[in-house]
Image: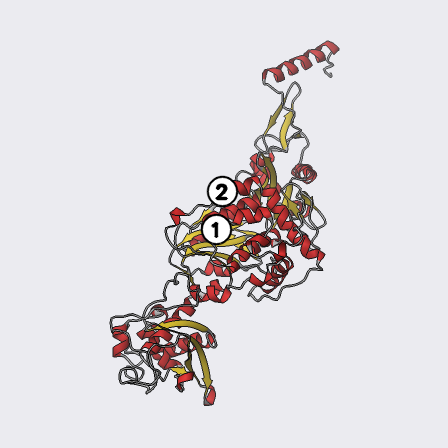
Amino acid sequence: MSDRRSHGKTMWDRLNATLRQLRCGSTSTRSRQIIWGVTPQGHCVGGMTVDGFLAQVAKILVDSRRVYRWGNSILYEVAGGDGSWLLPLANEYKAETAAASRLATLFCVGVQHAEQQTEALPPANLVGALLADPALGSGLPTIQYYSRRPVFDVDFQLCHPGWNAASGILVHDAETEPVLPTPGTAQAATVLDRLPPCLRHLLAGFCWHSDADLVNCVGLCLTGLLVNHFVEAPHPVAIVDGNQRGLGKTLLIQALGRLLDGVEPPRIKLTGDEELEKKLCAHVREARSSLILLDNVRGHIDSALIEQNALSPVLNFRILGQSATVSRPNSFLWAITSNNMSATEDLVNRGLPIRLHFEGDPRRRDFGADVLDYATRHRRELLGELAGMVLHWQQQARPHGTHRHRCQQWARLIGGILEANGLGEYFLANLAEAEASMDEGLQALATLAELLLAQKRAEFVQVAEEGLHGTGKPPADWATVFVEADLYREQLGPKSARARATWAGQFLGAKVDRLVTVTVADRTATATLRKRELRARKNVYYFEIVWTVEPDAPSHPTSETSDRSGAGWPASPEPSTTPKAAPVKDESAESAPAAQKPDVKAADSARPGETSGNDLPWD
């Protein structure tokens, strides 16, 4: 017999339910859907099925327009006082620990009984099953590019804030109004005066090594605005180098972070590659900052991880404690700050050099304004000026620059924008000089040239105006010179004579026609490595020397200066003097850190042909 409830009984139950809600403080106005028929333990009851649960929740997630797929991850959009950002829900179809709690803002579960109903947060086991379902990922909007600043799509149209479905671009930033340059600005007398007013004020306090370094910094700002155009075709690593501490290298990147993302990038310490991968993985997973800052790097930089990933279209890093990886498009700006940097050739030629230089005590310098505060308060105006430079370039039919760089498409596009705004002649103008001071290979080349020139080794050098014609020497003889100069001990020390010759040949072959500046006995010269091919594809190498500073002494040979060649060589340095590399730099610049210096004692006692390949000072 059915239990028919009277009208009074029904009203009484409703009154009790309302009183219970009032006692529990149920005053929230949040719209949170309830999936009925699911217990807090994740059991389906009352006719609910797992498929039914997954279908309902998948629809809630899609309809919320707050859940996205990006790379191999599913992310959830949240908002706070400083704007919106993305939090990870799952990676490679595996739910994050906090995924159920994060989705509780969208739905909960409950069970209805005859006289009452219970509600609970989403059970983790069912949420894990939901996020592991490929059908969910295929139904979510896919982010092609995510940004916390204004973005230009592939047609260089400025995207609106929020989700841009046609281009797959998600913008978490307010509307930005481009500000076109003032007519005549591009013809101003100084480079600084050619910048828009807010950008000029932001960058005026830094002690730039040259105009090229200032313009390269502007190019870096434009790269941040257009970085979605440089994913498949890569963009370079910003190398911010100073001649001493306290010049504001880190401050510059912090200001750039506030300008581009509204937040400062975390400072990542350069450690071993395994530890560095963990730090980079943690950074890109939640990525509230699009800058990867390797700050205050000391010593020589040799990181295969950076070289492999900096120009890669996709970043893949292993998650700490898991066998899974996180994958993201490489739309990050990489920046390294250091003093008197020395790095591998592969890293240097991937770089955009931005150098700071100051003579004297940097503590006496005054920026004149709080750079970080200015970047924060005037962020909208600064972004508008950068967007205006891009718009001005479009109005001039988008000319391409002719600048050369390993990242060729990037150089053509950014160079064209700078050219349209009166800055193109300075862009990348410091590449050769910066490479000479930072590239360990060119530093070593300069050390070799100084050693051979100081020792008057005519068989290895050619001095054109003095009638000296170096015949050149094969790689086997050069390997001995490397040992004399104490260069590349790790590469050459444990090898056989043939292996040393092979390595030396590879090194020299890659440096043919490269020029370095050297100084011997107060005279300066340029040294260019040349190759001469003999029979049977045998190559010999020598330096072509051109003096750039005329000697004070007479040009005719003397008994003191002609002991080996019969020509006007500079006087030899004292035996205790160690030749030191002098890369190409402005006269006002502090010399870069020298490459590994030659062991003069070994150099005086060893000559090609006097020691066997396996009987060298290292053995």
Comparing 336 with 586, the one in front is: 586
Whether residue 180 is situated above or below residue 106 in the rendered picture: below
Residue type, label 1: Phe
Say left or right for 15 vs 290.
right
Comparing 329 with 318, the one in front is: 329
Q: Position of residue 166 (x, y in %)?
A: 72, 49
Residue density around tag 2, few if under 14, some if 14–19, many if 20 or more, within 10 Å: few
**Residue occupying image coordinates x 38% and y 68%:** 582
Residue topped by disc 2: 369
**Residue occupying image coordinates x 58% and y 63%:** 425
Residue topped by disc 1: 206
**Structural distance between the alpha carbons of marks 2 and 1:** 11 Å
Q: Is residue 322 at all visible to an observer of this figure?
A: no
Q: Which dot marks residue 614? A: none
Comparing 40 with 486, the one in front is: 486
Quarter residue 376 falls in: top right
Comparing 45 with 85, the one in front is: 85
Q: Position of residue 203 (x, y in %)?
A: 52, 49
Q: Quadrant of the N terminus?
A: top right
Kindly give the residue lying farthest to the bottom in the view shown: 535
- Callout 2 touching callout 1 (CB < 8 Å): no
Whether residue 391 is situated above or below residue 288 in the rendered picture: below
Q: Mark 2 vs mark 1: which is more N-terminal?
A: 1
Dot 2 falls on a residue whose secondary structure is loop
Q: Is residue 352 at all visible to an observer of this figure?
A: yes
Q: Position of residue 409 (x, y in %)?
A: 61, 63
Dot 1 falls on a residue whose secondary structure is loop
Here the colouring is secondary structure
Residue type, label 2: Ala
